[in-house]
Image (cartoon, rainbow, N blue to C red):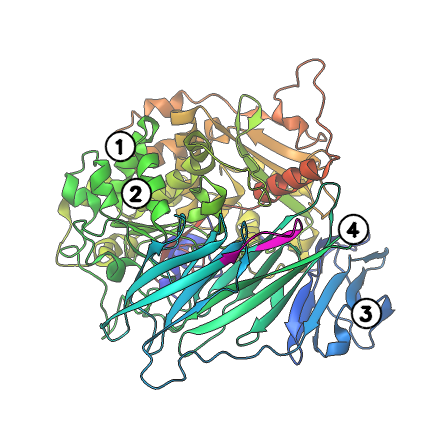
Amino acid sequence: MLLQLLRVGAAASVACFLTACGNSGSGGTSSTAPSPTTAPLISVAPGSRAVAVGATVSFSVAATASPTRYQWRRNGLDIVGATSATYSKVVDQVDDGARFSVVVGNGIGDTVSADALLTVYPVPALETPCAAAGTRMFKVTSASVEAGGVVGAVVGGCAGPLRTIQWTQTAGTAVSVLSDKTGAISFVAPSAGTYSFQVDAVDANGAAATASVDISAVPATSTTQIAVRVDQAVRQGGSTSLRTWPTLESGDAVQSVTWRQTSGPAVVVDTSDPSRALFTAPTVSPDTILRFQATLVTAQGKTATDEAIVLVESEVQAPNQPQYVFQGDQVSRTYPYKASGQYASVLQRCVYAPQLQWEDAGKNTCTLATLPFLAQDTGGNEPTVAQIMDRVVVSHDWMGAVFEQFIGRSDMVDVRRLLNGVTAVVIGAHVRPSFYFSLTGAIYLDADNFWLTPDQRDVIDETPDFRTDFDRDLQYSGVWRYELNSNNIFLFFPPDSRATTRTFDDLVLQTAWLLYHELGHAGDFLPPAVRGSLNSGATAWDNISARFNAAQLPSDVLAQQLPLTSTILRGLAQVKFLGATADATQRSYTPQQIGAFFSADRASDEYSYTTIREDIAMLFEEFMMYRNHGIRRDIAITDKITPTATSNTLIVRWGERGRDGAPAVDPRVKLAVQNIAPWIDASQVDALPPPIDMRAGDTWTNNLNLPAPPPGTRVQSITTPAARAADAWLLDRASHWPPAHRAPGSQGAAGGRR
């Protein structure tokens, strides 16, 4: 239980820990909820799937208004006995193309879900590239494609996953390869011809291995194409995504995209968005190849197919045992960004290795003599960019290059100083959500926060944050955003557009809040006031644990001196952010009731009730966004967000802008700032502008203009597909919360997301 506590971040964990969680009940109210007054609204609809014959597939639904009836249907006809919130079946080929829906009802009425499409295909064949005796490393290339298409190749190990990999192009038109230190490369072939590469690797036994790989492209003849991006490598148990990119003739349109797996151990593919396939890599030994095929059918009857190769690496992950730092988690392949940096030889094994143990006989976490906190190298002064980059671990080189430019900006001075509280920064394509972990003293950042180009975005896993439907049974939604000049700072960058690029100014708006939050956790667990007395012979956690166990962290002091008081909201936070099951009373609360509970207390955000660690991080994050960027946070309690809701229809029942400036919250902000960033004059907290109330009964969109919209202001309509996609993304972001902190003992009280 202790380990779950030591991760913290902008997302919380599934379990709770000590005082970080507090009372998890519903506030002592009756467990018998009043009868519903409306028919159910479906909050999470069943999603489409693609599976092999013989696989078990499951569909599930969640709805508000206390449903009492479920009836699943196949092609519009009731399925006998399928009367619960989840329906599972073993599929056969005759199920291919079947559509499944569910009727959800209560005493007031019924609601029918949208259809989920089931695609079924034959059991994929298994490839055996390691079958020949003595094979140490294998290579596989994609089938030849037309110029302008996506090609790729993978290399894997036969005695275990390759330790290091380096691809170097040796012939053909020069191409950009962003994954040249992973087991898979993928790129657009600009012209017909052969593209040759040399792969240099170190195998699982420490021996060097070299291979030559030729990838071919033929002249383009078709004007209708589909490309699957990207060929990739993932460790067993890792979440994986593939996305299709169609090229159409003028006047044509996409009619359908279907997926099938053509080789490798069978997996269940989530095709809820038909342009994107999501799946979990199977357990394998040795490294194993999976192939997937996407087929495009256009409105004019044209067809096209493309294939993607996924290498599943047989890296053994940590068992779900509490002495392991990453117990039950998926640790993806990374490496030091600066190969010759001061700590390059120890970074990965100290902060992001599957077999790290923080206690018991197998304890192998690094002491500060091996990997010190950055403050020990800087004496607490502002670190140089070079000092920071010596501690950066990445899954792809571009992540380090972007981060290096980002933290070198003039408006990132506080971020650089806050980084004194960490041992390392890990940025990965499969890190989600972001978190701070006091067992290692490092922060772990989702690379989705740092991409600038579509090619960079291609390598990032699109699997949603695991917390996305925790609030499915509640009758209200909580939303948030950051606002500048009556505009939402978060921008939608369409995932299906190759023209989408971002600037470093965009990254500040998208990412600064995250860094303040995670580094706020680092400053809570290891405040600047104690960094001068660290024991270099002990680990990061050993230097933190005494104060943690004695409840002497700044977040403990905050909870002791200026605590939050609502046990109702604390209990609901366990549901919304940690995955607890809502009881009948919690399911009955209306948005108006929640707004009243929240406004009477002194939290800056709903997420503050998750743990006391998140409470202080939220206060600090919001203050820093205003101090350094003039950006204020909006928080609101609204009607329940449903699949058909938009920002123009979602009604605010209570809301506020800049709650950090409220008289009841101000002293709490000051305590956070004084302890986490003592170089900041605490009088700046007193200068925060007072909060502005939102207009209850008005929409989330209209409440961007506060205290009242200028005369003649018109709400932008949400009618085009592009506008609907942008609004859906912004609303989804508004209803989900930050990363997670982690500390030993719970999957997230002192920490976050487990």
Instruction: State the separation of the CA atoms marked 3 and 4.
Output: 29 Å
Instruction: Identify the mark at residue 550; answer none if there is no mark.
Output: none
> Where does residue 324 sit, x and y in percent of width and height?
33, 69
Answer whether labels 1 and 3 touch (C-beta < 8 Å).
Answer: no
Can residue 750 be seen here? The reply is no
| Residue 722 falls in image quadrant | top right
Which residue type does callout 4 highlight?
A: Gln
- Magenta-colored stretch includes residue 219: yes
Q: Residue at x 65, y 77 (%)?
A: 56
Instruction: State the separation of the CA atoms marked 3 and 2.
Output: 54 Å
Which residue type does callout 2 highlight?
A: Gly
Total labels drawn: 4
> Where does residue 654 sit, x and y in percent of width and height?
64, 34
Residue named by callout 1: 678
Q: Secondary structure at mark 4?
A: loop
- Magenta-colored stretch includes residue 170: no
Q: Earlier in the sequence, mark 3 or mark 2?
A: 3
Q: Residues within 10 Å of mark 1 (few under 14, many from 20)?
A: some
Instruction: State the separation of the CA atoms marked 2 and 4.
Output: 59 Å
Which residue type does callout 3 highlight?
A: Arg
Instruction: Identify the mark at residue 74; answer none if there is no mark.
Output: 3
Answer whether labels 3 and 4 touch (C-beta < 8 Å).
Answer: no
- Location of the C terminus by quadrant is bottom left
**Horizontal placement of 300 versus 369: left or right?**
right
Residue named by callout 4: 300
Instruction: Please state which of the two labelled residues, at mark 4 or mark 1, is closer to the viewer.
Output: 4
In this view, 656 is above or below 148: above
Instruction: Identify the mark at residue 523; answer none if there is no mark.
Output: 2
Q: Residue at x 57, y 61 (%)?
A: 278
